[in-house]
Amino acid sequence: MLPLRKRSKEKVELPTETADKECKFFALLLNTTTKDEGEEFLDYSFPSESPEMKAILPMKGVFLASCGVMKAAVGQEVKFLGFRSIDGAKEFKVSLRPLERWILCLVLPASAADSSSQFFVEEA
């Protein structure tokens, strides 16, 4: 378990692995501070050893860049992104939320309701 602090200064334990083989959601914590080229900006991912997470991880740069592009283009933060696998077999929805120096990316199946994904990302 990784300790994190919530705004209330209480410590919260984040899971490092999942018990079941198939996970219904994925979480990424992307560091928004300026990094050198090639330096890793993924601070946390859950479940880290999942084959699906490994397939999603190459999208982390797209998630981070989309936040900056949309903010510059329209002056508002991105709340949702949708994407699908190359073969079109799986579709996902990403809820994004800025948290201090990070962007929280919560990846859910595309069938998840916007209100549900927004609830989860706001409660994190």
Image (spheres, helix red, strand yellow):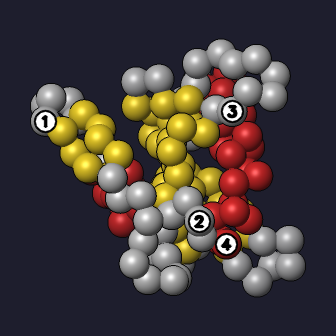
- Asked whether the residues under the numbered discs 3 and 1 touch, taking CB atoms below 8 Å apart as contact, a structural biologist would say no
Residue visible at 69% across and 54% down in the picture: 57
- Count up the numbered dots: 4
Instruction: Inspect this view and state whether residue 22 appears.
Output: yes
Residue visible at 69% across and 33% down in the picture: 40
CA separation in Å, label 4 and label 3: 20 Å
* Mark 3: amino acid: Glu
* For marks 1 and 2 on the same chain, the one whose residue lies earlier in the sequence: 1
CA separation in Å, label 1 and label 2: 28 Å
Task: Note whether 101 is above or below 13 in the view shown.
Answer: above
Q: Which residue is mark 3?
A: 40
Mark 3 burial class by Cα count in 10 Å: few <14, some 14-19, many 20+: few
* Mark 2: amino acid: Glu
Dot 1: element: loop
x and y percent of residue 64 in the render? 65, 36
Q: Which residue is mark 2?
A: 49
Q: Name which quarter of the figure residue 4 lies in.
A: top left
Mark 2 burial class by Cα count in 10 Å: few <14, some 14-19, many 20+: few
* For marks 4 and 3 on the same chain, the one whose residue lies earlier in the sequence: 3
Which label number is shown at residue 51? 4
* Mark 4: amino acid: Pro
Dot 2: element: loop
